[in-house]
Every structure is written in C-alpha cells, then in structure tokens.
Image: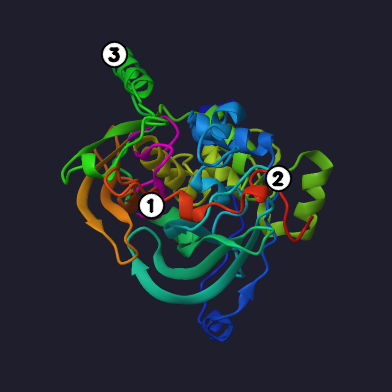
Amino acid sequence: MTENQAQAAAQLSEGTLTDEWITQWEDRIGLNLRVGNIFNQSVSREAIRNFSNGIGDLNPLYRDEAYAKETKYGALITSPSWTASVFPHWVLQGLPGVHADHSASEWEFLRPIYIHDKITPKSQFVGFDVRQSKFAGKTVFEYQRFEYWNQRDELVARGYCMLVRYERQTAKQKTADGEGKYDHIQVPHPWTLEEQAKVDEDCLAEEIKGAKTRYWEDVNEGDALKPVIKGIFGLTDMIAYCVGAAPVQLGAHGVQLKAYCDHPAWKFRDPVLGSWEPVYGVHYLVSAAKGVGAMYAYDVGVQRNCWMINLFTHWMGDEGWLKSCNAQYRQFVYLSDAVWFKGKVTRKYIDENGEHCVEVEAHGINQREDDTIPATAVIILPSREKGVSPIDKRLPAEEYRGTGKGVYF
C-alpha cells in the first residue's frame, strides 16, 4: 500500500442542496416516517449484553439476571439508553448523497424496559431550518420526534432529535482549502506511554453505585459525579457498538451487495481495500470519513449520548431514575481519542409530582480539552425521609416483569 493510498479519500455519492427540495420538505412536516432500520426490537438477554458491551457498561443491573432479580425490578432490565439500539432516533429521509450527522437529542425516559419485552419505534418529521455553516456552507438542520412503545402499548421513551444535512463535496473542498473546522487537530492522537497508562487507570477507577442506595437527602448542589472514561477509542470499540446497536443495515457479501444495487447512494468503493463499503463506514474507515470532509473516522452521535447516560446510571444507583437527558453532539470523537465524562449537581428540588429530583450539568471532555457533548439531565432519587422510590411508580404489574406478556403474546 502506498502512502497516497493510505491517505486517500473515498468517493462517496454526492448530492446538492437545491431550492426545489424545500417545498417538498415543507409539505412533509407532520408526517409519520417509516422506520426501516429497526435493529434490537426483541429484548433478549443476548441483545442486552451486546449493547452493554458495545457502550462499555459494566452495571450488573443490565448484565446479571440473579442480581437484577433481587432489585425492585425483579428481573433483568436494560440501560435507559438501550432504545437507541432499536433505532437511533432518526429516519434518513430523502436528499440522497447529502450527508447527515446526528447532532443533538432531547431524550425522556418513562418506563423500564425488561428482558423479553418487544419495542416498537415511531418517528415523525417536525421541521427544518436552512443555515450557513463554516464546515460545509449551506446546511439543513432537520428535526424529528421519536417514540418507543412496548408490547403492552406503554410509552417507554420519547424525545426530539436534530440532524445536520450538508453537501459532502462542499465540506471536502473547505477542508482541502484549509478552511476545515477541525484542521488543527492531529489524528491519530500522539499519546505517550504514560498518558495511555493514565487513561487506563482512570477507566478502571469508575464506580457503580448499584445496590448502595443514593438518597436525595444525601445529595448537595455542587456535588461532583465520579467520572466515566471512554477510550482510548479504537476500532474494536466501534465494532462492539455496531454489534450491540447497528443503527444502519450492515451485512456481508451478497446480502449487502444486493442492498447496494437497490440503493446505490448507500455505498462507495474503498480506495485502500477495493471493497464496497457503506457510507456508515465514516465511523471506522478513514477513507470514508475523509470522503465527507472529516479529519478521521469518528464516533456515532447517539453512541456518545449512551456513554453520557452511563455516567448518570453509574452515579444514581439501582433505585434512581433517569428522567431525561438533553445533549448536543459537538466535536467528533475520533478513533484514538479518549473522553472523560464529568458532571455536577446544579439544582436539588421536589417537583410538581412530589418526586425528589436533582439536575445535573455534564460534559464529555477529550484529551484536547474540547467539550464534545455538553448535556443536562434530571435524575429522580429515592427519599429516606419520605420512604418513597421513583422505581415503584414506574414498574409494570408484577405478572408482566420479565415475562414479555402483553398484546403481542
């Protein structure tokens, strides 16, 4: 392989943001979108395990059936973020060859998801804006609403997300002209052996509150959350996420080739390997990432949100409930990066429903001190004085816990 081959950018399908599509999209606002990229609809033990492995979550509440059985849940449940593995909040609608980056989500969690449940997603197109960006010139900010329902017709999670749509050829040209948003970044990151060892040390120092209940009365405004560390982000980390969440259709050989014949804009010929690859390869192939104007292969937006939620669930313990998480996906997390997820309690209050809440401000800081994902969350904690737990009011009837019983059974 020559140096030029190693540095080559793949030639991906390129579309143009013409004025004609604006009227078409205005007519589509309010429409329910067909969710065609459903992955983990059935909540099996293996699906929960693979997703937990894919985001690097060791919480036994989501991994150990015997442990989970002794909690208030009474059976194995998923991480709140697991719905992202059903489908990743968004449906890619129209504009073939125009790139899409998932850039923000407002995510609300209503009920636990149990082993043997069946989750059905829904999506609605709610609007868009046209703006100018430094990274890619003319840019569309697209907004969708997402919902996830279980087999008992209970809404388990919902929210809104934002996609940023831009012309790949414009982003590539700006990078080539030295106007790229991230041209100052050195990738792969030049870690020293000592720095690598420190990342490992920080990662192994994570704490899971688990069965040691964190009560609302013991929390104070200004309290820091014990950090969660993701990295050094490597190719196996990305593969593990695909195994656990696969937010697009991934297949091998003839299966994938036939799909590409039906959808030519999905594929490109990799300049290094000579293979047909999906546009989703921007997350693990440097040639694909450069083909859309990025510096290097980078993470998935909602994947980073799942990492952030890992911070909250580690801290709140088994009896806490993550009510919401609102996050913006800022600078990419490139292969070879590491991210320290940190947070602090900014407010402590009792809400209109009498639940004992804390607000948390959080950030995902990489080794360059960039904030890759500013976020806020609301966490409901049990009260020692009142003797109440947020879990109690969100449990299904006892005969449904971990059985999968409901309208589909």
Give how far apart the Cα atoms at labels 1 and 2 are: 36 Å
Instruction: Give the residues drawn in magenta, as a range.
Output: 316-340
Which residue is located at x 82 percent, y 51 percent?
258
The x, y position of residue 186, in whole percent, is 33, 34
* Residue that badge 1 annotates: 329
Q: Quadrant where the N terminus lies? A: top right
Type of amino acid at the residue the image marks with label 1: Tyr
Give how far apart the Cα atoms at labels 3 and 1 are: 29 Å
Q: Which label number is shown at residue 403?
A: 2
* Residue that badge 3 annotates: 194
Which residue is located at x 21 percent, y 52 percent?
348
Q: Is residue 10 left or right of residue 204?
A: right
Mark 3 or 2: the one toward you: 2
Residue 15 included in the magenta stretch of the image: no
- 10 Å neighbourhood of mark 2: few (<14), some, or many (≥20)? some
In primary-sequence order, the first of circles 1 and 2 is 1
